[in-house]
Amino acid sequence: MSLLDEEGNQDESLESKTLSAEDQVKDHSAGTRVVAGQIFLESGKSDSQSENEENFHSREEEKENSLEELNSLEMSNLLNKDLEEAEIPSPVLTAIGGTADGEPCHFPFLFMEKEYAECTADGREDGRLWCATTYDYKKDQKWGFCESEEQSNKRRQMQEAEDVYQIGMKILNESNKKAQEKVAYQYLLKAADMNHTKAMEKVSYALLFGDYLKQNIQSSKELFEKLTEEGSPKGQMALGFLYASGLGVNSSQAKALVYYTFGALGGNLIAHMILGYRYWAGIGVLQSCESALTHYRLVANHVASDISLTGGTVVQRIRLADEVENPGMASGMLEEDLIQYYQFLAEKGDVQAQVGLGQLHLHGGRGVEQNHQRAFEYFNQAANAGNSHAMAFLGKMYSEGSDVVPQSNETALQYFKKAADMGNPVGQSGLGMAYLYGRGVPVNYELALKYFQKAAEQGWVDGQLQLGSMYYNGIGVKKDYKQALKYFNLASQGGHILAFYNLAQMHATGTGVMRSCHTAVELFKNVCERGRWSERLMTAYNSYKDGDSNSAVVQYLLLAEQGYEVAQSNAAFILDQKEASIVGENETYPRALLHWNRAASQGYTVARIKLGDYHFYGFGTDVDYETAFIHYRLASEQQHSAQAMFNLGYMHEKGLGIKQDIHLAKRFYDMAAEASPDAQVPVFLALCKLGVIYSLQYVREINIREVFSHIDMDQLLGPEWDLYLMTIIALLLGTIIAYRQRQHQAIPRPAGLRPAVPQQEPPPEHQPPQ
């Protein structure tokens, strides 16, 4: 299935995503329920999202006043549900034309010895719907059409479009080959031309991103406008994105906000996420932590409800700047050769390679696509060799069930027991889950607690998470929010999404901790960024690697709107390198500056330095040394950046944006050398240059004649300084004369001998080497 299909499923309205009571409670005792892999006390409400809120609000009800907006939304959902369940009389249909024009249709009516409770096209070759106005059509021959000819043609056209759409979706869902997916999109294009809403949504996004169809921003914009007129939340959100990023239209943050708001009201989760980020960062709206909390919590509830025992997909956050400087080093991606090497080892019976490849295929990531069939095969091989880790993961797969592995509590329990008996923490945690939820065994909280504690002691995050849930709700143990907080914190350090979610709920409601809206928003934001839409980070990266910078930058821009810091920095990087032709040359640097600014506000050091560079050189803005100095100083103080310290040293040396101070310049250069070994060589050269400049400046400023004219020898050497000087000169002269006389004194020779005649030295070429 393509990523667009995944996003399509993710973008459904919130009401359609709430869990039913039957799904939430499986083989569990009364008074508790299971939501997103956690236990919550039953509050008696029918709406699952409302139940989540009430459980966390049960202890401190006075905190609910700050969340009135969310609660009012939940109440409207409940009212809508009640209205749906109420019996509303259907409108009376009036026959059009036929033999009973204007008379009401009679339901049921008898035709060809069959009763019809609604209009039918049976008996007609043109497919128009009709009804009888009396019970027995054969007897009375009283009938009329249920629709006009225009309505009939429109209905048939929409049915034909639906058929074409379903063919395209079937091909898309059943194939992973790009050629087949392109064929599928030809069917979707045809359905979109017939005004099929879902087909138009898929085609418009494909045109926007260049997925399976040639990228065409203008055509996608026209489709989004058409969808917006029809009230499509997806179309509204996408049109808001175009206005926010200025693609195909003149940039307008006000219009973007309007369309995002309508998309969110229609239940579009990405629109909610974008609004959450905008309220959190104060982009185009007044900064409001509570409003951000409302939007982020709605999305986080959905993401958390999708998390299974096997965990969510791995989010690959690859920075293009790091990738360009050190290909493959910073991305964490596995090279194809390395994967093939591990596969070779696995085929040769290497158990560790089998388990490692099984986990890679189970979760996906690091350049390996999620593939449950391959994961199952590798785990099976390792389990047959007696590996406890593989047994535990097989238990997880059987417990969850999938298209490849049928759900079986009994088989899962067998694998969990084998792994737990060998002391494996994953097996112990799985066994704890079985006893907690009564999956294949009777519910036993004491045994569940025991196995979770064993798993937690070995540092397994699932054990820590479930222990936290048990302490939070007082199931099998006395309710203890401090212990719950401790275990949730431990699980969050291991990166468990549900641990972040639970901590966010506790901070949002002030349960067991001081209420902190800011902390809750940051935690909920972390959860939201682990949703399936994060997979587009990898598709954007792959587009960039394939040389399609236009597709990559659009995808990164949408993710940047959602608040992904890595997407903001990557979009800015592509714009900075001027690799995206869809953005005008005059707009490249200003847009890059905008996204560097957003990435810097989320703590990315390189982005903060880039902001300083842009203001220093005047890229996308006026040259402003003072602002550049502020950004460099922030990067130096907050992130201890060696580059920022070096730049501050240079600005102090030259007096740019700050008073010239050579001593401070040297201090910052020294700090840069201490902060990073890579900075030592440029710092040495800078200090050498600084020393030369300082010496020349000193010599230039000094006047030798003036110096000597101001020297008072009496004060410096005393009143008899001339006698001292003459004595020193006399001593020096005497020493020199004595030395010279000793040099020229003849050496005494024995009588009768002549002075030896020195032998002539051989020519240089015959001299022995020294």
Image (cartoon, rainbow, N blue to C red):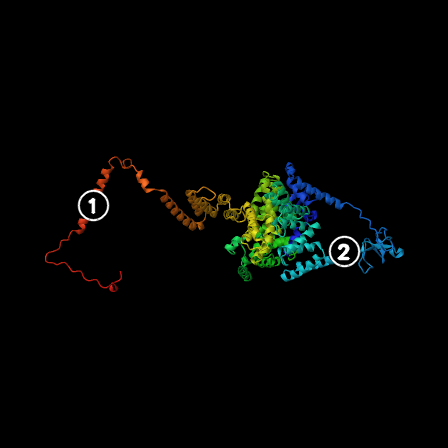
| Amino acid at pointer 2 | Lys
Question: Can you tell which quarter of the image residue 6 is in?
Answer: bottom right
Residue farthest along the right direction in this orientation: 139
- Comparing 251 with 302, the one in front is 251
- Circle 2 residue: 154
Does residue 452 appear anywhere in the picture? Answer: no
Does residue 104 appear anywhere in the picture? Answer: yes
Residue 362 appears at what percent x and percent y? 60, 55
Q: Are marks 2 and 1 in contact (CB under 8 Å)?
A: no
- Circle 1 residue: 735
- Comparing 164 with 733, the one in front is 733
Q: Residue at x 45, y 44 (%)?
A: 655
Q: Residue at x 81, y 48 (%)?
A: 91
Q: Would residue 247 appear left or right of 666 to someone viewing this image? A: right
Separation of residues labelled 2 and 1 (CA atoms): 124 Å
Residue 657 appears at what percent x and percent y? 48, 43
Q: Taking 342 as reference, is 558 above or below it?
A: above
Within-10-Å neighbours for mark 2: few <14, some 14–19, many 20+: few
Residue 49 appears at what percent x and percent y? 67, 44
| Amino acid at pointer 1 | Thr
